Amino acid sequence: MAFTAISTDAGSDGSHYVSLRIDGFNRKVFLYDRYGDDMAKKRGDMWVYNIAAFGFPSGYQFTCISSWDIDSVEIRAYSNDGWQISSIVTLVASKNHIELLTTDFNVDRWIDYNGNEEDKVFELTRATSQTDEVLKMNVAKLLSGDVSAMRFNPSKLQYY
């Protein structure tokens, strides 16, 4: 889940992608075009991917994936239309288990392909054991289809 900042030009119509590093393999997948406006100012978006979408080498098999199997997660700019991310949370979920992978709140971080190298990549921060329990409950509710959590508000932004 990503929340776009409220400043002028914070939103983006450009293409950006998420990159995972697992067991020395770097793989990326574009943030697909969701219904309506993606990455719109003062709004939230949620993308869901199966690990297979990242195109790991043939023969590579996951017996089980947990948050600690993933070495790093990055959001990368692939467009000259920058995006100002206010807050972003990533998860690893299986049929019966949800783990927070990264949490970055109120960071107001720009990613833009036009910028210098550090503006092109946003390495996300690993969640810790101190991560807010309320966030864990809201994320679990969202993934189970409970819409009461859809007004999650990390920085006065709303997820619709």
Image (spheres, grey):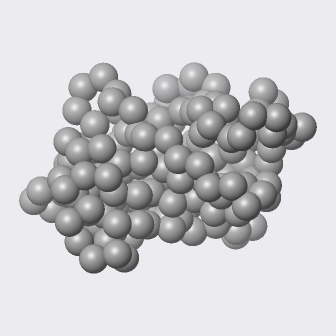
Q: Residue at x 24, y 26 (%)?
A: 36
Q: Residue at x 12, y 56 (%)?
A: 9
Residue 133 x %, y %: 67, 56
Q: Camera-side residue: 140 or 12?
A: 12
Q: Quadrant of residue 154?
A: bottom left
Left or right: 64, with 110 as reference point? right
Which residue sits furthest front? 58
Residue 42 x %, y %: 23, 49
Q: Camera-side residue: 101 or 43?
A: 101
Left or right: 7, with 76 as reference point? left
Residue 30 x %, y %: 43, 40
Q: Quadrant of residue 61?
A: top right
Q: Quadrant of residue 8?
A: bottom left
The image shows residue 154, relative to residue 105, as above or below, that is above
* Total residue callouts: 0
- The answer to whether any part of residue 156 appears in the image is no
Residue 120 x %, y %: 34, 66
Which residue sits furthest left? 8
- The answer to whether any part of residue 31 appears in the image is yes
The C terminus is located in which quarter?
Answer: top left
Q: Residue at x 71, y 40 (%)?
A: 57
Q: Residue at x 23, y 45 (%)?
A: 14
Q: Camera-side residue: 44 or 150?
A: 44
